[in-house]
Image (tube, helix red, strand yellow):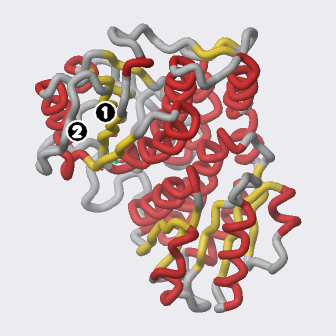
Amino acid sequence: ALIGKGQHRHFMIKEIYEQPQVIGDTLNTMLNPASRTITLPDLPFDLASVKRVTIVACGTSYYAGSVAKYWIEKLGRVPVEVEIASEFRYRQPVLVPGDMAVFISQSGETADTLAALRYCRDAGLHTVALVNVAESTIAREATTALLTQAGPEIGVASTKAFTTQLVVLACLAMGMARANNRLDAAEEARLSQALAEVPARIAEMLRGEDNIRQIAEDVAQARDVLYLGRGPCYPIALEGALKLKEVSYIHAEGYAAGELKHGPIALIDDHVPVVVLCPSDDLYDKTASNVQEVIARGAKVIFISDAEGLSKLAVKPMASFQMPPVDPFVAPILYAVPVQVLAYHVALARGTDVDQPRNLAKSVTVE
Ligand code: G6P
Protein backbone atom coordinates (compact mmCIF):
# COMPACT_ATOMS: atom_id res chain seq x y z
CA ALA A 1 0.00 0.00 0.00
CA LEU A 2 1.13 3.52 -0.67
CA ILE A 3 1.92 5.35 2.52
CA GLY A 4 1.07 9.03 2.62
CA LYS A 5 1.98 11.89 4.90
CA GLY A 6 -1.63 12.60 5.80
CA GLN A 7 -1.99 16.06 7.29
CA HIS A 8 1.75 16.37 7.86
CA ARG A 9 4.38 18.09 5.76
CA HIS A 10 6.98 15.39 6.17
CA PHE A 11 7.20 11.74 7.10
CA MET A 12 9.51 12.60 9.98
CA ILE A 13 6.91 14.68 11.83
CA LYS A 14 4.13 12.26 10.90
CA GLU A 15 6.14 9.44 12.41
CA ILE A 16 6.94 11.49 15.51
CA TYR A 17 3.21 11.98 16.02
CA GLU A 18 2.50 8.29 15.48
CA GLN A 19 4.51 7.42 18.58
CA PRO A 20 1.66 7.31 21.11
CA GLN A 21 -0.17 4.90 18.81
CA VAL A 22 2.72 2.62 17.86
CA ILE A 23 4.14 2.53 21.38
CA GLY A 24 0.69 1.47 22.53
CA ASP A 25 0.60 -1.19 19.82
CA THR A 26 4.03 -2.45 20.87
CA LEU A 27 3.10 -2.48 24.55
CA ASN A 28 -0.04 -4.45 23.73
CA THR A 29 2.13 -7.35 22.61
CA MET A 30 3.85 -7.63 25.98
CA LEU A 31 2.02 -5.76 28.70
CA ASN A 32 -1.19 -6.80 30.37
CA PRO A 33 -2.68 -3.53 31.65
CA ALA A 34 -5.24 -5.27 33.88
CA SER A 35 -2.81 -7.45 35.82
CA ARG A 36 0.02 -4.94 35.27
CA THR A 37 2.41 -7.71 34.29
CA ILE A 38 4.79 -8.35 31.42
CA THR A 39 4.69 -11.39 29.16
CA LEU A 40 7.72 -11.86 26.96
CA PRO A 41 7.49 -14.02 23.84
CA ASP A 42 8.62 -17.62 24.43
CA LEU A 43 12.38 -17.92 24.36
CA PRO A 44 14.08 -21.23 23.61
CA PHE A 45 16.39 -20.71 26.59
CA ASP A 46 16.01 -19.72 30.22
CA LEU A 47 16.55 -16.01 30.84
CA ALA A 48 17.77 -16.85 34.33
CA SER A 49 20.68 -18.78 32.81
CA VAL A 50 22.00 -15.71 30.98
CA LYS A 51 25.17 -14.53 32.70
CA ARG A 52 25.95 -11.70 30.30
CA VAL A 53 24.13 -9.80 27.58
CA THR A 54 25.79 -8.46 24.45
CA ILE A 55 23.83 -5.89 22.46
CA VAL A 56 24.95 -5.05 18.94
CA ALA A 57 23.50 -2.43 16.58
CA CYS A 58 24.24 0.63 14.43
CA GLY A 59 23.10 4.23 14.45
CA THR A 60 19.97 5.07 16.37
CA SER A 61 19.39 1.40 17.21
CA TYR A 62 22.76 1.40 18.98
CA TYR A 63 21.53 4.18 21.25
CA ALA A 64 18.43 2.15 22.09
CA GLY A 65 20.80 -0.63 23.15
CA SER A 66 22.78 1.86 25.22
CA VAL A 67 19.66 2.78 27.21
CA ALA A 68 18.91 -0.93 27.67
CA LYS A 69 22.27 -1.40 29.36
CA TYR A 70 21.19 0.95 32.15
CA TRP A 71 17.85 -0.81 32.54
CA ILE A 72 19.06 -4.42 32.41
CA GLU A 73 21.97 -3.83 34.76
CA LYS A 74 19.89 -1.86 37.25
CA LEU A 75 16.86 -4.15 37.31
CA GLY A 76 18.27 -7.54 36.34
CA ARG A 77 21.81 -7.20 37.77
CA VAL A 78 23.21 -8.91 34.67
CA PRO A 79 26.24 -7.31 32.99
CA VAL A 80 25.54 -5.83 29.56
CA GLU A 81 27.91 -4.85 26.79
CA VAL A 82 26.67 -2.62 24.01
CA GLU A 83 28.64 -2.37 20.84
CA ILE A 84 28.58 -0.83 17.40
CA ALA A 85 28.27 -3.69 14.93
CA SER A 86 31.11 -2.59 12.64
CA GLU A 87 33.52 -2.60 15.59
CA PHE A 88 32.22 -5.74 17.24
CA ARG A 89 32.52 -7.94 14.17
CA TYR A 90 36.22 -7.26 13.64
CA ARG A 91 37.61 -7.03 17.15
CA GLN A 92 37.51 -10.71 18.11
CA PRO A 93 35.28 -10.22 21.14
CA VAL A 94 35.33 -12.78 23.93
CA LEU A 95 32.05 -14.64 23.65
CA VAL A 96 30.72 -17.29 25.99
CA PRO A 97 28.40 -19.94 24.53
CA GLY A 98 24.99 -19.81 26.19
CA ASP A 99 25.08 -16.06 26.75
CA MET A 100 22.48 -13.89 25.07
CA ALA A 101 23.21 -11.51 22.22
CA VAL A 102 20.59 -8.99 21.13
CA PHE A 103 20.68 -7.41 17.66
CA ILE A 104 18.66 -4.25 17.32
CA SER A 105 17.70 -3.09 13.85
CA GLN A 106 14.72 -1.21 12.52
CA SER A 107 15.14 -2.60 9.01
CA GLY A 108 16.55 -5.98 9.97
CA GLU A 109 18.88 -5.66 6.98
CA THR A 110 21.88 -3.64 8.21
CA ALA A 111 24.95 -5.44 6.86
CA ASP A 112 27.22 -5.02 9.89
CA THR A 113 24.51 -6.00 12.37
CA LEU A 114 23.70 -9.10 10.32
CA ALA A 115 27.38 -10.05 10.18
CA ALA A 116 27.62 -9.66 13.97
CA LEU A 117 24.58 -11.88 14.39
CA ARG A 118 26.14 -14.64 12.28
CA TYR A 119 29.35 -14.30 14.24
CA CYS A 120 27.55 -14.76 17.57
CA ARG A 121 25.41 -17.60 16.26
CA ASP A 122 28.54 -19.44 15.13
CA ALA A 123 30.06 -18.84 18.57
CA GLY A 124 27.11 -20.61 20.22
CA LEU A 125 25.28 -17.64 21.73
CA HIS A 126 21.51 -17.33 21.95
CA THR A 127 20.67 -14.73 19.33
CA VAL A 128 17.69 -12.44 19.82
CA ALA A 129 16.69 -10.00 17.09
CA LEU A 130 14.78 -6.83 17.90
CA VAL A 131 13.46 -5.63 14.57
CA ASN A 132 10.64 -3.67 13.04
CA VAL A 133 10.38 -5.82 9.92
CA ALA A 134 9.22 -9.33 10.81
CA GLU A 135 10.31 -10.94 7.54
CA SER A 136 13.76 -9.30 7.50
CA THR A 137 17.01 -11.24 7.26
CA ILE A 138 18.06 -10.47 10.84
CA ALA A 139 14.67 -11.63 12.15
CA ARG A 140 14.88 -14.85 10.16
CA GLU A 141 18.44 -15.72 11.12
CA ALA A 142 18.15 -15.09 14.86
CA THR A 143 17.04 -17.78 17.29
CA THR A 144 14.23 -15.52 18.43
CA ALA A 145 12.74 -12.33 17.03
CA LEU A 146 11.16 -9.64 19.17
CA LEU A 147 9.12 -7.18 17.14
CA THR A 148 8.47 -3.50 17.39
CA GLN A 149 5.08 -2.46 16.04
CA ALA A 150 6.22 0.87 14.63
CA GLY A 151 4.79 0.21 11.17
CA PRO A 152 6.75 1.27 8.08
CA GLU A 153 9.24 4.04 8.89
CA ILE A 154 9.84 6.18 5.81
CA GLY A 155 11.79 9.16 7.17
CA VAL A 156 15.49 8.35 6.95
CA ALA A 157 16.08 9.65 10.47
CA SER A 158 14.63 7.07 12.83
CA THR A 159 12.02 8.26 15.34
CA LYS A 160 9.16 5.88 16.10
CA ALA A 161 11.33 2.82 15.52
CA PHE A 162 13.65 4.08 18.28
CA THR A 163 11.01 4.66 20.95
CA THR A 164 9.30 1.34 20.19
CA GLN A 165 12.68 -0.38 20.50
CA LEU A 166 13.05 1.26 23.91
CA VAL A 167 9.66 -0.05 24.97
CA VAL A 168 10.53 -3.64 24.06
CA LEU A 169 13.91 -3.32 25.77
CA ALA A 170 12.25 -1.99 28.92
CA CYS A 171 10.02 -5.07 28.95
CA LEU A 172 13.02 -7.31 28.33
CA ALA A 173 14.82 -5.72 31.28
CA MET A 174 11.79 -6.38 33.46
CA GLY A 175 11.60 -9.95 32.18
CA MET A 176 15.24 -10.54 33.04
CA ALA A 177 14.79 -9.00 36.47
CA ARG A 178 11.82 -11.26 37.13
CA ALA A 179 13.67 -14.34 35.90
CA ASN A 180 16.44 -13.49 38.36
CA ASN A 181 14.00 -12.97 41.25
CA ARG A 182 14.76 -9.31 41.37
CA LEU A 183 11.35 -7.97 40.48
CA ASP A 184 8.53 -8.52 42.94
CA ALA A 185 4.88 -8.22 41.94
CA ALA A 186 4.48 -4.72 43.36
CA GLU A 187 7.49 -3.42 41.48
CA GLU A 188 6.38 -5.15 38.29
CA ALA A 189 2.98 -3.50 38.64
CA ARG A 190 4.54 -0.09 39.23
CA LEU A 191 6.88 -0.29 36.24
CA SER A 192 4.12 -1.75 34.03
CA GLN A 193 1.87 1.14 34.98
CA ALA A 194 4.62 3.63 34.12
CA LEU A 195 5.04 1.99 30.70
CA ALA A 196 1.29 1.89 30.09
CA GLU A 197 1.13 5.66 30.62
CA VAL A 198 3.88 6.48 28.12
CA PRO A 199 1.60 6.95 25.08
CA ALA A 200 -0.58 9.48 26.92
CA ARG A 201 2.45 11.32 28.30
CA ILE A 202 4.01 11.60 24.83
CA ALA A 203 0.74 12.92 23.41
CA GLU A 204 0.75 15.49 26.21
CA MET A 205 4.35 16.45 25.49
CA LEU A 206 3.62 16.89 21.78
CA ARG A 207 1.06 19.56 22.60
CA GLY A 208 4.08 21.72 23.36
CA GLU A 209 5.43 21.43 19.81
CA ASP A 210 5.08 25.14 19.21
CA ASN A 211 7.38 25.97 22.13
CA ILE A 212 10.02 23.69 20.64
CA ARG A 213 9.54 25.36 17.26
CA GLN A 214 10.42 28.69 18.86
CA ILE A 215 13.50 27.27 20.54
CA ALA A 216 14.49 25.81 17.16
CA GLU A 217 14.69 29.30 15.63
CA ASP A 218 17.63 30.00 17.92
CA VAL A 219 19.27 26.61 17.56
CA ALA A 220 19.10 26.96 13.77
CA GLN A 221 21.60 29.87 13.99
CA ALA A 222 24.20 27.75 15.77
CA ARG A 223 27.26 26.10 14.30
CA ASP A 224 27.66 23.61 17.13
CA VAL A 225 25.20 22.26 19.67
CA LEU A 226 25.87 20.20 22.79
CA TYR A 227 23.44 17.71 24.31
CA LEU A 228 23.87 16.63 27.91
CA GLY A 229 22.25 13.88 29.93
CA ARG A 230 23.02 11.48 32.75
CA GLY A 231 22.17 7.86 33.38
CA PRO A 232 19.71 6.48 30.84
CA CYS A 233 19.24 9.99 29.44
CA TYR A 234 22.90 10.07 28.41
CA PRO A 235 22.23 7.86 25.36
CA ILE A 236 19.22 10.09 24.65
CA ALA A 237 21.61 13.06 24.54
CA LEU A 238 23.70 11.10 22.02
CA GLU A 239 20.59 10.32 20.00
CA GLY A 240 19.46 13.96 20.16
CA ALA A 241 22.80 15.07 18.76
CA LEU A 242 22.63 12.43 16.03
CA LYS A 243 19.10 13.51 15.05
CA LEU A 244 20.22 17.13 14.74
CA LYS A 245 23.28 16.23 12.65
CA GLU A 246 21.26 13.97 10.38
CA VAL A 247 18.48 16.34 9.47
CA SER A 248 19.87 19.87 9.97
CA TYR A 249 23.59 19.30 9.18
CA ILE A 250 24.52 21.28 12.29
CA HIS A 251 27.44 19.82 14.20
CA ALA A 252 26.22 18.39 17.48
CA GLU A 253 27.67 16.24 20.21
CA GLY A 254 26.11 14.35 23.04
CA TYR A 255 27.97 14.14 26.32
CA ALA A 256 27.49 12.58 29.69
CA ALA A 257 26.81 15.62 31.87
CA GLY A 258 29.50 14.56 34.34
CA GLU A 259 32.07 14.41 31.56
CA LEU A 260 31.57 18.07 30.69
CA LYS A 261 34.54 19.19 32.75
CA HIS A 262 36.82 16.82 30.86
CA GLY A 263 36.77 18.64 27.58
CA PRO A 264 33.55 19.96 26.12
CA ILE A 265 33.30 22.79 28.65
CA ALA A 266 36.12 24.41 26.66
CA LEU A 267 33.68 24.84 23.77
CA ILE A 268 31.15 26.75 25.80
CA ASP A 269 30.46 30.33 24.88
CA ASP A 270 27.32 32.26 24.08
CA HIS A 271 27.18 30.82 20.57
CA VAL A 272 26.82 27.19 21.62
CA PRO A 273 23.35 26.06 22.63
CA VAL A 274 23.44 23.32 25.27
CA VAL A 275 20.40 21.08 25.36
CA VAL A 276 20.05 19.45 28.77
CA LEU A 277 17.86 16.42 29.40
CA CYS A 278 17.13 16.48 33.10
CA PRO A 279 14.13 14.55 34.41
CA SER A 280 13.42 14.63 38.15
CA ASP A 281 15.26 11.50 39.22
CA ASP A 282 18.07 10.60 41.62
CA LEU A 283 20.59 12.29 39.32
CA TYR A 284 18.70 15.56 38.94
CA ASP A 285 20.88 17.53 41.37
CA LYS A 286 24.07 16.42 39.67
CA THR A 287 22.93 17.51 36.24
CA ALA A 288 21.43 20.74 37.59
CA SER A 289 24.81 21.65 39.06
CA ASN A 290 26.46 21.03 35.66
CA VAL A 291 23.88 23.40 34.20
CA GLN A 292 24.90 26.09 36.68
CA GLU A 293 28.51 25.65 35.63
CA VAL A 294 27.80 26.12 31.95
CA ILE A 295 25.42 29.02 32.47
CA ALA A 296 28.15 30.73 34.51
CA ARG A 297 30.29 30.45 31.37
CA GLY A 298 27.68 32.08 29.23
CA ALA A 299 26.13 28.98 27.70
CA LYS A 300 22.71 29.21 26.10
CA VAL A 301 21.05 26.38 27.97
CA ILE A 302 17.86 24.75 26.74
CA PHE A 303 16.64 22.95 29.83
CA ILE A 304 14.25 20.06 29.36
CA SER A 305 12.65 18.85 32.58
CA ASP A 306 9.33 18.40 34.37
CA ALA A 307 7.59 21.13 36.38
CA GLU A 308 9.38 20.15 39.57
CA GLY A 309 12.78 20.09 37.86
CA LEU A 310 12.18 23.44 36.20
CA SER A 311 11.15 25.09 39.44
CA LYS A 312 14.12 23.72 41.37
CA LEU A 313 16.71 25.07 38.95
CA ALA A 314 18.54 27.92 40.70
CA VAL A 315 19.77 29.63 37.53
CA LYS A 316 17.85 30.88 34.55
CA PRO A 317 18.37 28.98 31.31
CA MET A 318 17.97 30.67 27.93
CA ALA A 319 14.96 28.49 27.27
CA SER A 320 13.19 25.63 28.88
CA PHE A 321 10.71 23.00 27.84
CA GLN A 322 8.33 21.44 30.32
CA MET A 323 7.84 17.68 30.21
CA PRO A 324 5.04 15.77 31.89
CA PRO A 325 6.19 14.21 35.18
CA VAL A 326 6.94 10.51 34.71
CA ASP A 327 8.44 7.60 36.59
CA PRO A 328 12.25 7.85 36.07
CA PHE A 329 12.14 4.32 34.59
CA VAL A 330 10.38 5.56 31.45
CA ALA A 331 11.99 9.02 31.29
CA PRO A 332 14.44 8.08 28.50
CA ILE A 333 11.52 7.02 26.28
CA LEU A 334 9.73 10.28 26.88
CA TYR A 335 12.79 12.54 26.61
CA ALA A 336 13.64 11.05 23.21
CA VAL A 337 10.67 12.86 21.72
CA PRO A 338 11.45 16.56 22.31
CA VAL A 339 14.91 16.11 20.79
CA GLN A 340 13.29 14.60 17.69
CA VAL A 341 10.89 17.54 17.44
CA LEU A 342 13.73 20.00 17.97
CA ALA A 343 15.83 18.43 15.20
CA TYR A 344 12.83 18.51 12.90
CA HIS A 345 12.12 22.20 13.44
CA VAL A 346 15.77 23.19 13.18
CA ALA A 347 15.89 21.35 9.84
CA LEU A 348 12.77 23.19 8.68
CA ALA A 349 14.32 26.51 9.67
CA ARG A 350 17.46 25.58 7.74
CA GLY A 351 15.49 24.38 4.74
CA THR A 352 17.13 20.97 4.49
CA ASP A 353 15.55 17.86 3.00
CA VAL A 354 14.13 16.48 6.23
CA ASP A 355 12.97 13.09 5.01
CA GLN A 356 15.90 12.41 2.68
CA PRO A 357 18.99 14.04 4.21
CA ARG A 358 22.00 14.22 1.91
CA ASN A 359 24.33 11.22 1.88
CA LEU A 360 22.21 9.10 4.22
CA ALA A 361 20.44 5.85 3.47
CA LYS A 362 17.48 4.44 5.36
CA SER A 363 19.14 1.08 5.53
CA VAL A 364 22.85 0.38 5.06
CA THR A 365 22.84 -3.06 3.46
CA VAL A 366 26.41 -2.98 2.19
CA GLU A 367 29.44 -2.60 4.37
C1 G6P B 1 21.01 4.02 8.90
C2 G6P B 1 19.79 4.89 9.16
C3 G6P B 1 19.65 5.13 10.65
C4 G6P B 1 19.59 3.81 11.42
C5 G6P B 1 20.82 2.93 11.08
C6 G6P B 1 20.63 1.52 11.61
O1 G6P B 1 22.16 4.73 9.21
O2 G6P B 1 19.90 6.11 8.48
O3 G6P B 1 18.45 5.86 10.93
O4 G6P B 1 19.55 4.05 12.79
O5 G6P B 1 20.97 2.81 9.66
O6 G6P B 1 19.56 0.94 10.92
P1 G6P B 1 18.76 -0.29 11.43
O7 G6P B 1 17.72 -0.56 10.36
O8 G6P B 1 19.72 -1.44 11.57
O9 G6P B 1 18.15 0.06 12.74
Horizontal side, residue 335 vs residue 194: left or right: left
| Residue visible at 42% across and 60% down in the picture | 242
| Residue visible at 47% across and 64% down in the picture | 241
Please, is residue 68 above or below residue 170 in the view?
below
Q: Residues within 10 Å of mark 1 (few under 14, many from 20)?
A: many
* Ligand 1 within 8 Å of the CB at mark 2: yes
Res 346 visible: yes
Say if mark 2 contacts mark 1, CB within 8 Å: yes
Q: Which label was assigned to residue 103? A: 1
Q: Give the x, y percent position of residue 302.
A: 68, 71
Q: Nearer the viewer, residue 221 or 266?
A: 266
| Residue visible at 26% across and 42% down in the picture | 363
Q: Which label was assigned to residue 113? A: 2
Residue 27 falls in image quadrant = top right
Q: Give the x, y percent position of residue 173.
A: 52, 29
Q: Give the x, y percent position of residue 290.
A: 66, 75
Please, is residue 100 above or below residue 62 in the view?
above
Horizontal side, residue 211 vs residue 268: left or right: right
Please, is residue 292 above or below residue 78 in the view?
below
Task: Give the amino acid at mark 1.
Answer: Phe
Task: Give the amino acid at mark 2.
Answer: Thr
